[in-house]
Amino acid sequence: MEYAQKKEYEINPQTMALIAKYDDRGQVITQVVERGNRFEITKCPSQVVDDSCRYFASSLEGRILGTKQVTSYTHKPPIVISEAMGIYFFPIISPKRKECSWVAHKYIRSYKGESDHTTTIQFSNGVNLNLPVSVGMFANQVQRTAHFRVILEDRLNAQPEVQETSSERIAETFS
């Protein structure tokens, strides 16, 4: 894996995780884990997520509010970064904390709890990653993200007749 330092980054379909870590000065930075690459960003993970949401015409706050509207999840809600690319992430602690790491839902192959109350994730490409979160909490986040994905993808894949009906109603309103 390559280790380099970058200043700007947008989450993309290759992004598997954004891991919070401390640099030499004690500042929280992000280790980006992509399918075949690892590197660091000089921003905290939630800032990288917010920048990526803004790149796709929203914000982290807007995505969180959207998830709450769709699912009623109020704590550590999963978010969609890009509906078109199917990029869904979830936080392992409160996204308001700089130390919050984020994981891409679609790359998780398996996970297991460790004796030190951490969780080891195995991604679909065979990469393992250990995170400071209990397996129960991690499992809950995986399940909530799956639930959110199903609801949102059902809405996005609604039958064309329903969309045409909505368009017809809008047209009638302005006639």
Image (spheres, grey):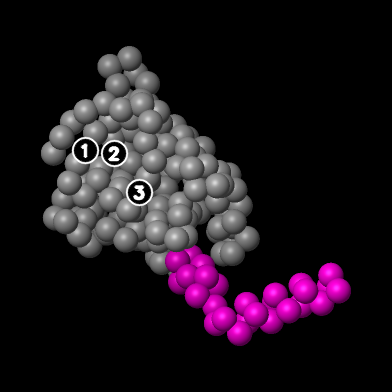
Quadrant housing residue 67: bottom right
Q: Which kind of residue does numbered mark 1 sit on?
A: Arg
Quadrant housing residue 25: top left
Instruction: Decide which of tag 3 and tag 1 comes sooner along the chain.
Output: 3
From this viewpoint, is residue 140 visible? Answer: no
Numbered mark located on residue 12 in the image = 3
In the image, farthest residue toward the bottom: 161
Instruction: Decide which of tag 1 and tag 2 comes sooner along the chain.
Output: 2
From this viewpoint, is residue 8 visible? Answer: yes
Q: Which kind of residue does numbered mark 2 sit on?
A: Val
Picture quarter with the C terminus: bottom right
Question: Tag 1, which secondary structure?
Answer: strand
Q: Is residue 111 above or below residue 62?
A: below
Quadrant housing residue 41: top left
Mark 1 and 2 residues: CB-CB less than 8 Å, in contact?
A: yes
- Indicate the position of residue 173 as horizontal and vertical percent values: 83, 73
Query: Residue drawn at (46%, 34%), measured in percent from left and top?
Result: 47
Which residue is labeled 2 in the image? 32
- Indicate the position of residue 166 as horizontal and vertical percent values: 70, 76
Q: Is residue 54 above or below residue 147?
A: above
Determine if the magenta segment contains residue 11. Answer: no
